[in-house]
Every structure is written in structure tokens, then in C-alpha cells.
Image (cartoon, helix red, strand yellow):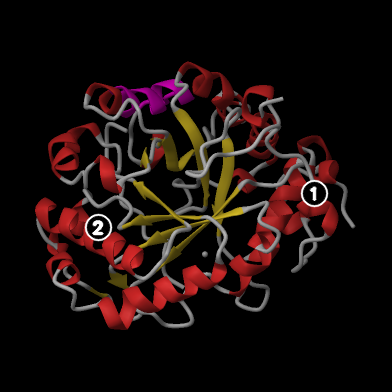
Amino acid sequence: MTVQLHRSRRVGGALAALALAAALIPSGTSVAQSVAPRVAPSRADIDSSTLACGVNRRLVPSCGVSWGVYTKQRTAAEGWATPFVQIERAIGRRFDLVKRYHDWSNSGGNGQFPDQYERQLGATGQRTLYFAWTSNIWSTGSFAHWRDIANGEYDSSVILPAAKRLKAWGKPVFIDFDHEMDGRTRTANGTPADYVAAYRHIQDVMANAGVTNVVWAWVPTGTMANVGRIKAMYPGDAYVDWVGYDPYNFFRCNGSPWEDPYRSLAPFYGWLQDNGMADKPILLGEYGSVPDPDNVGRIKDWYGGVPAALKRLPHIKAVIQWNSQTSTICDFRVTGSPAALSGFRSAANAPYVTGG
């Protein structure tokens, strides 16, 4: 990314697999509107196509790319597992990664994970849960200072309860702490050194509590203007299993030129390789593109071109689509149009992605 965009997206998110093919969805009808609500995944959903080979203890696939998504519920009544499974059905395969954002409240609504829907989707172990854990408390608009986290002020109230739940869950999970920690909205949380100390402290507390099933990700924005701050916020190789970033084709969303997937992904990838992180697997903690209203097919080509871009950037081993929007023009949903969904479906089933 060349321009940083801060998104407020964390407050609060038997049809055949090809029934949602782009050609079959009437013009002007969103994918979300086209799918009947459904809560529980079936055995067919769980056993649908996935990576052709396994992952190691740090969840790195030995072939292919772990394919993930973040999406949110449309109504409080349906829960967010419903739209998640609907996207799986639309693309004809199961996701490897289930991403959710959780706050620092340790409350049942936002702060306790795995929640009921995560447990539902991750029950068989064939979908890996990914928790983006923020030091903010959404209900009050407040946050925990990184220095206070590092000093142990939240050990008993937040970190140890989370450790207990994760240990009881038992299955491997990802955690990234304060996703996009280098962004402007994080400056009040403390200095880069404070962040490093907090990240390490959380991990140390969990290790001392006997938690062995967490794979630790470190995910800055990937904004090239921030690389000095980003480098200062790296917790160190011993504390980081995966490195990541959030590349987007913002286009009209922030007035930047249209970028194909490779141009969106390559700059920060190169920076990681040039700054001593070449041996770490890389994940895209969020990625996506807005459509071009003057060229409807352009968004299909963008998503369809993701596998070719990934093939040129072979250290990227996991990607997570941010299936949401912040405004009418800042719409990154693959379910926002038949064209976007068609390209995303093609990418999700590409041989390079599936390892087939």
C-alpha cells in the first residue's frame, strides 16, 4: 500500500456450490441477498475441497496457500457463521482460515474467544481459527496502554482467562496482537518499544500457563511510509511465527491509481525480504480490492489474478480476504457483485492455491 486507510470495522463482524455463479445472479442483486439464511455447516460444507497437502506445527502449508476470509453478520439474529458458510458454498470449497476480531474486554460479546460461532466452524479442526486480538475496548471506546499490558496489569483479568480458554480449545489457532499496530489510530497506545514489550509479555504469560496451541502472527499495515516505525515494532524472531501485512487496491476509495494484485502485494513483501524476515512465512492478514464502476469486469480480473501474483511471491503462504466495506465507494466485499465473486471463486480453486 502506498496510502494508509484506517477502517472502522471491528464494532459489534440445500444450494449447490455453484448456484451463486455470477451468470446466474440477476443484475442489481447482491450475493448476500441471493442466499437463504443458514446457520449450521453441514458435513458437505466441512468436507469440501481444501489444500491437497497438510500443514506443519506452525500451520505452514507444504503446498498451496491457506485460504481465509473475514466476514461479519448481517443481522444480530443470524450470527456470522451463516454468511461465512454461504461464501464457502458460493466458491465451491471450504476456507482454511476463519478470521475474527476480538477486543480487550474479556466480555462474552466481543472479548471472549473462541466464541460460539468460531467453535461451530472450527469444531472438526479442518478450519483453523484466526484471532486478531486488539487492546481496544469497543463498547467504551477506550484501550489498554501497551506499557500497562507489559507490566502485568491485565494478566489476571484478560490474558490468563484467554489462556485458559485457548488451552481448553486445544486445536491450533493463530493470534495476532494489535493488528496494524503501526497505524495512526494506535499512536496513543504507546511507543514501538511498549508494543514489543506487550507482545512478548502476552506470549510469555500464555506459555507459562501451558498454552502450546497458539501460532503467533505479527501483522502491520504494510504501508511503505511507515516502515521505520514498523521495523521498530518487530518483537523478534523468537516471538514471531508468521509475518504479515494488509495490501489493498484502494483505487477510488482513497483516490489512488488502480493497482493489479502484484503491484498491491509486492512492495512490502520486498521490504520484508530485505529486512531479515526472509525465513518467515508471510500472510496477508487482510487484502482486497474495490470495484471500478466504469469497468465492471475489472474486479473479476483483479481477483482472478491473485494466484498468479502469489506465485511470484512464494513466501506468502496464507491470505485472508476482508469481506466488508466502510462506505459505498470503499467496498471490498467479494459478495458485493457477481463479477467480484466470480473472480474470487476462480482464485480460490486455482491449482497454485489448492496445491493440486
Would you say the magenta stretch is mainly helix, strand or loop?
A: helix
> Circle 2 is placed at which residue position?
199
**Horizontal and vertical percent position of residue 14:** 90, 57
In the picture, measured across the screen, residue 35 lies left or right of residue 84, that is: right
Q: Quadrant of residue 266?
A: top left
Q: Is residue 30 visible?
A: no
Q: Is residue 51 visible?
A: yes
Q: CA distance from mark 2 to mark 1?
A: 36 Å
Residue sitting at x 31%, y 51%: 6
Location of the N terminus by quadrant is: top left
Residue sitting at x 79%, y 53%: 45
Q: Residues within 10 Å of mark 1 (few under 14, many from 20)?
A: few
Residue 332 marker: none
**Horizontal and vertical percent position of residue 61:** 56, 35
Q: Quadrant of residue 177?
A: bottom left
Q: Which residues are magenta?
A: 257-270
In the picture, measured across the screen, residue 252 lies left or right of residue 199, that is: right
Residue situated furthest top in the rendering: 312
User: Could you tell me if the residues under marks 2 and 1 are in contact, i.e. CB atoms within 8 Å?
Assistant: no
Residue type, mark 1 in image? Asp
Q: Nearer the viewer, residue 199 or 264?
A: 199
**Horizontal and vertical percent position of residue 164:** 44, 75
> Circle 1 is placed at which residue position?
47
Q: Is residue 131 above or below residue 110?
A: above
Earlier in the chain: of badge 2 and badge 1, it is 1
Residue sitting at x 65%, y 47%: 95
Location of the C terminus by quadrant is: top right
Residue type, mark 2 in image? Tyr
321 inside magenta stretch:
no
261 inside magenta stretch:
yes
Residue sitting at x 33%, y 35%: 255
